[in-house]
Image (cartoon, helix red, strand yellow):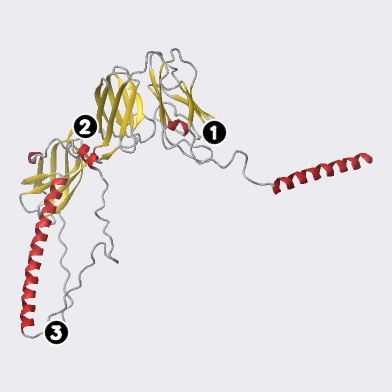
């Protein structure tokens, strides 16, 4: 009987001690040890091997050591095929390698090793991309590249350049750049920045095959239907290249649709862009009236930009004539007002002056604010613009309600593939003008 009592008293004493400890802790809440939370992203303390090191017979794993714990993003490098690279492996680029790369998280360090092992007499690039976060979600804004050799000294040659999307006429950002020293197939790899530029430093001199790939599935490889471009470059000390990525279609451009523009004009829409280096040929387009296939003469063919320019010029001429008529009409009205004023009738009050830009109450015009894109324009001007539409102007009026067969021969896409195509278009019948019902009815 005494044991249970003694046991109960002991439990009460322990409970009292726990309550006292909790009370003491609650009475002294504050910031955790170590000072205020860090607001700067993690920084690289050291790497193994160091950048610039020559390490013959290197084994083990390359290590990137940070000065604090970084976030372990889920996933790892994808396997073979077209599997996407996920997780922390997205922030690591190791090249040149012939296969997959193992990337693992070790709290404040990243370990990297190629599945094929480290090859002798090879210069490796280990690039750490921006976007690595610590546990407080501070994210790195810049990256770093570690260059080391498993054989001879580090070379000093460099390759730089710019990647563009040819059809879209814009810079290609975050493109995968692959530069393979011929005849090898293991390529140096990097990504373009927000201006579409790339730079590979410390590569061996020689002849390179260079690719720019819009990596849509994030596997850092060239896959079907992904826009890309490739060039051969000789790298001595420095070299540069401009790459024009586009979808390399193995099927020629097919006629997708044909639509009427006006009484003399048709627009042909193709399934892929046409080669802009080849001017449109009127002999390649034939128009026939159905059902008896009577030939209709083709007077001219226009690229979309040419046709739009002609249309804009025609509108400008029409606007100029309208302004001239309006000015003449205003002069006639002013003359009549002057005659009325001389007869003793007071002249109407002058119209109120419009608000001047910059004056109090005036709305500031921001339509003229433009981003400086001079460099991009200079680059894009080096090649003609691809187009996937062709405007056909006939030599005679197209009959409303009639159908026409349009045949195109020898259409060539950007990959140089040629094909023929045809399509049928029906000319719409103009809707009758609505009847004027505002006139008063006769009694």
Left or right, 274 with reference to 33: left
Is 127 in front, or is 311? 127
Whether residues under marks 3 and 2 lie with C-beta atoms below 8 angstroms apart, the answer is no
Whether residues under marks 1 and 3 lie with C-beta atoms below 8 angstroms apart, the answer is no
Which label's residue is closer to the chain start, 1 or 2?
1
Which label's residue is closer to the chain start, 3 or 2?
2
Left or right, 19 with reference to 381: right
Write down the residue under mark 3: 442
Which of pointers 3 and 2 indicates the residue nearer the eye? Answer: 2
Q: How many marks?
A: 3
Q: CA distance from mark 3 to mark 2?
A: 71 Å
Give how far across and how far down residue 415 sits, in percent.
Answer: 21, 32
Give how far across and how far down residue 238 sits, in percent.
Answer: 27, 24
Disc 2 secondary structure class:
loop
Residue shown at 10%/85% (left/top)?
Answer: 345
Which label's residue is closer to the chain start, 1 or 3?
1
Residue shown at 17%/69% (left/top)?
Answer: 434
Q: CA distance from mark 1 to mark 2?
A: 49 Å
Location of the C terminus (image quadrant): bottom left
Write down the residue under mark 2: 415
- Looking at the image, residue 290 lies above or below residue 242: below
Q: Classify mark 2: residues with Cα within 10 Å, few (<14), some (14-19) or many (20+).
A: some
Q: Classify mark 3: residues with Cα within 10 Å, few (<14), some (14-19) or many (20+).
A: few
**Residue at the right extreme of this rendering:** 1
- Looking at the image, residue 430 lies above or below residue 13: below
Q: Is residue 432 in view?
A: yes
Write down the residue under mark 1: 69
Q: Classify mark 1: residues with Cα within 10 Å, few (<14), some (14-19) or many (20+).
A: some
Disc 3 secondary structure class:
loop
Disc 1 secondary structure class:
loop
Which of pointers 1 and 2 indicates the residue nearer the eye? Answer: 1
């Amino acid at each position: 009987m005494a044991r249970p009592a003694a046991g109960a008293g002991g439990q009460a004493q322990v409970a009292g001690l726990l309550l006292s400890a909790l009370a003491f802790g609650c009475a002294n809440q504050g910031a955790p040890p170590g000072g205020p939370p860090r607001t700067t992203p993690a920084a690289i303390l050291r790497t193994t091997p160091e950048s610039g090191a020559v390490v013959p017979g290197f084994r083990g794993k390359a290590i990137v050591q940070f000065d604090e714990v970084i976030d372990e993003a889920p996933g790892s490098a994808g396997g073979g095929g077209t599997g996407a690279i996920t997780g922390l492996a997205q922030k690591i680029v190791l090249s040149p390698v012939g296969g997959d790369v193992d990337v693992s998280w070790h709290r404040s360090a990243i370990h990297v090793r190629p599945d094929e092992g480290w090859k002798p007499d090879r210069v490796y690039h280990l690039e750490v991309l921006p976007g690595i976060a610590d546990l407080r979600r501070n994210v790195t804004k810049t990256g770093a590249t570690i260059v080391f050799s498993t054989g001879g000294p580090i070379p000093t040659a460099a390759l730089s350049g710019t990647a563009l999307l040819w059809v879209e006429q814009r810079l290609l950002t975050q493109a995968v750049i692959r530069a393979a020293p011929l005849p090898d197939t293991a390529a140096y790899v990097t990504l373009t920045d927000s201006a579409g530029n790339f730079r590979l430093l410390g590569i061996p001199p020689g002849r390179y095959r260079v690719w720019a790939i819009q990596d849509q599935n994030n596997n850092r490889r060239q896959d079907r239907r992904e826009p890309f471009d490739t060039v051969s470059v000789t790298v001595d000390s420095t070299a540069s290249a401009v790459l024009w990525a586009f979808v390399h279609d193995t099927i020629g451009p097919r006629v997708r649709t044909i639509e009427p523009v006006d009484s003399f004009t048709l627009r042909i829409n193709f399934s892929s862009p046409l080669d802009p280096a080849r001017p449109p040929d009127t002999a390649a387009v034939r128009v026939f009236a159905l059902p008896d296939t009577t030939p209709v003469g083709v007077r001219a063919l226009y690229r979309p930009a040419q046709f739009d320019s002609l249309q804009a010029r025609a509108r400008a001429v029409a606007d100029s004539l309208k302004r001239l008529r309006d000015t003449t009409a205003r002069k006639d009205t002013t003359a009549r007002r002057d005659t009325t004023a001389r007869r003793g009738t007071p002249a109407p009050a002058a119209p109120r002056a419009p608000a001047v830009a910059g004056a109090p109450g005036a709305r500031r015009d921001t339509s003229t604010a433009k981003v400086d894109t001079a460099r991009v324009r200079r680059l894009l001007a080096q090649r003609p613009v691809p187009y996937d539409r062709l405007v056909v102007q006939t030599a005679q009026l197209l009959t409303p309600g009639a159908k026409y067969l349009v045949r195109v021969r020898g259409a060539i896409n950007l990959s140089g593939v040629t094909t023929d195509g045809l399509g049928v278009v029906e000319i719409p019948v103009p809707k009758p003008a609505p009847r004027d019902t505002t006139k008063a009815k006769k009694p």
